[in-house]
Image (tube, grey):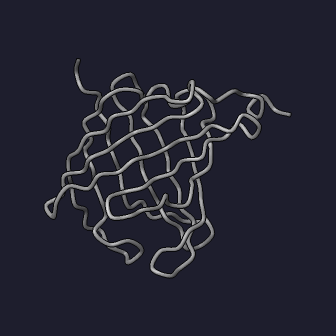
Amino acid sequence: MTETTLRDGSHDFDFFVGNWNVHHRVLRSRLTNCTEWDEYVGTCFNDNIMGGQANFDESAIDRPAGRVNGMTLRLYNQESREWSLYWAATGSAIFDVPMIGSFKDKNDLGEFYAQETHKGQHVYSRFIWSRITDNFCQWEQALSTDGGKTWETNWIMEHTRMSS
């Protein structure tokens, strides 16, 4: 086994604990060669739960059409040393397909993947956590229709820690 395989990532999301202001950039139309982005503001409140083996956040996104509320539950699997990320939002009574992955090193790039459908088409989906500091981090979502050879980023969130 490699050193990366043996790494305990159960504290990978500790950096995210706290209260955040969020700047959202959302592609207007996914997988249509669209280049127009909408921008919104929001908040995110995050904490570790289950003795640190899970992480939970609640988000609010203020869009012109109204507020969208969402939540993410992140569960750490000690055996695989990977996280499963589950998202649910206003208007849905179910969690989306879990995104599964890990960080290479503490506060390094985190990559999470799943297979899902978008408008009836099977796609790969990817979340990336990056640019992590004490007071800032970035999350982005992308889709691929060609098995992961190319990716279209469709949502970027820049989190700035709220002052105490």
At horizontal 27% and vertical 50% (from top left) the residue drawn is: 24
View extreme (left): residue: 64
Image position of 52 with respect to 69: above or below = above
At horizontal 63% and vertical 35% (from top left) the residue drawn is: 104
Image position of 9 with respect to 154: above or below = above
Residue 82: image location, x then y, percent: 66, 41
At horizontal 50% and vertical 63% (from top left) the residue drawn is: 151
Where residue 80 sits, quadrant-wise, is: top right
Image position of 152 with respect to 14: above or below = below
Counting labels gives 0
View extreme (top): residue: 164
Residue 117: image location, x then y, percent: 53, 73
Image position of 59 with respect to 13: above or below = below
Where residue 3 sits, quadrant-wise, is: top right
View extreme (right): residue: 1
Residue in front for this viewpoint, 4 or 33: 4
Residue in front for this viewpoint, 141 or 42: 42
